[in-house]
Amino acid sequence: MEIIVVLLPIFVIFLLLYVIYVLLYSMILGAPYAATRVRKMNMMLDLLKLTTGDKFVDLGSGDGRFVIEAAKRGVSSYGYEMNPILVIISRNKIKNEKLSDRAKIYWKSYWNVNLGEYNAVAVFGIKHIMPSLSKKLKKELKEGSRVVSNHFRFPNWKESEKKENLYLYKI
């Protein structure tokens, strides 16, 4: 009983710090986790017209559903996620689906990575990051790369295609 009395406050403090970290960090540098529905995810991946020669990345990969679905389509797929719990969940799903040969989740911020090796990008950002992300992608992605955004538009970019509130851009 005494151990519970000692460990409970430590657990509560840890949990509180974790929630603050995830919420504040994701709100400032990314977007909070919001799972994209399967129908929307498939529409986004279809807009990208993925082929087996593509190298796909999901910026803020959440529970890994985009990375897994793209890998099931035969595409080399990667995700960047800041939430360590979601990274563990994603990696476990990838392992269970036996997709480790073409799907990988990184526990890091995509802001600290050069994205130039990717030619197909999915993002479900939030309005205040889109201008900075626009500059980063324009600087790093090669000509011919495709970017699909859920809900939020990139400022000063002309979409190649629009479906519902999904926007496809070609660099």
Image (cartoon, rainbow, N blue to C red):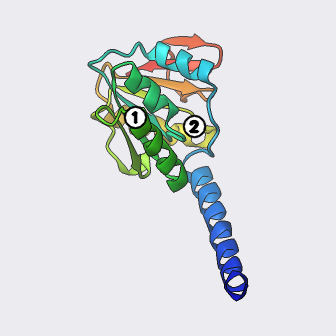
Answer few, some or many: residues within 10 Å of disc 1's Cα (few below 14, many 20 plus, some between 14 and 19).
some
Where is residue 24? Give x, y as percent: 63, 58
**From what the image shows, is residue 128 above or below residue 45?**
below
Q: Residue at x 49, y 39 (%)?
A: 61
Q: What's under tag 2, amino acid-wise?
A: Gly
| Element at label 1 | helix
Q: Dividing the image into 4 quarters, which one contains the C terminus?
A: top left
Where in the figure is residue 10, as x and y percent of width and height?
65, 79
Q: Residue at x 59, y 26 (%)?
A: 150
The residue that disc 1 covers is 137
From the viewer's side, name the closer residue of 35 and 2.
2
> Which residue of the protein is positioned furthest toward the bottom in this rendering?
2
In three-dimensional space, the C-alpha distance between marks 2 and 1, rounded to whole angstroms, equals 13 Å
Query: Do callouts 2 and 1 mark residues in contact (Cβ within 8 Å)?
Result: no
Q: Is residue 96 left or right of residue 3?
A: left
- State the residue in front, 10 or 153: 10
Q: Residues within 10 Å of mark 2 (few under 14, many from 20)?
A: many
Q: Residue at (29%, 27%) from the top-left corner?
A: 142
| Secondary structure at numbered mark 2 | loop
User: In the image shown, does 2 or 160 lie closer to the viewer?
Assistant: 2
Relative image position of residue 69 (x, y in whole percent): 46, 25
Q: Which residue is mark 2?
A: 125
Instruction: Tell me if residue 120 comes above or below residue 28 in the rendering.
Output: above
Mark in front: 2 vs 1 = 2
Q: Residue at x 55, y 29 (%)?
A: 155
Specify the quadrant that holds the N terminus. bottom right
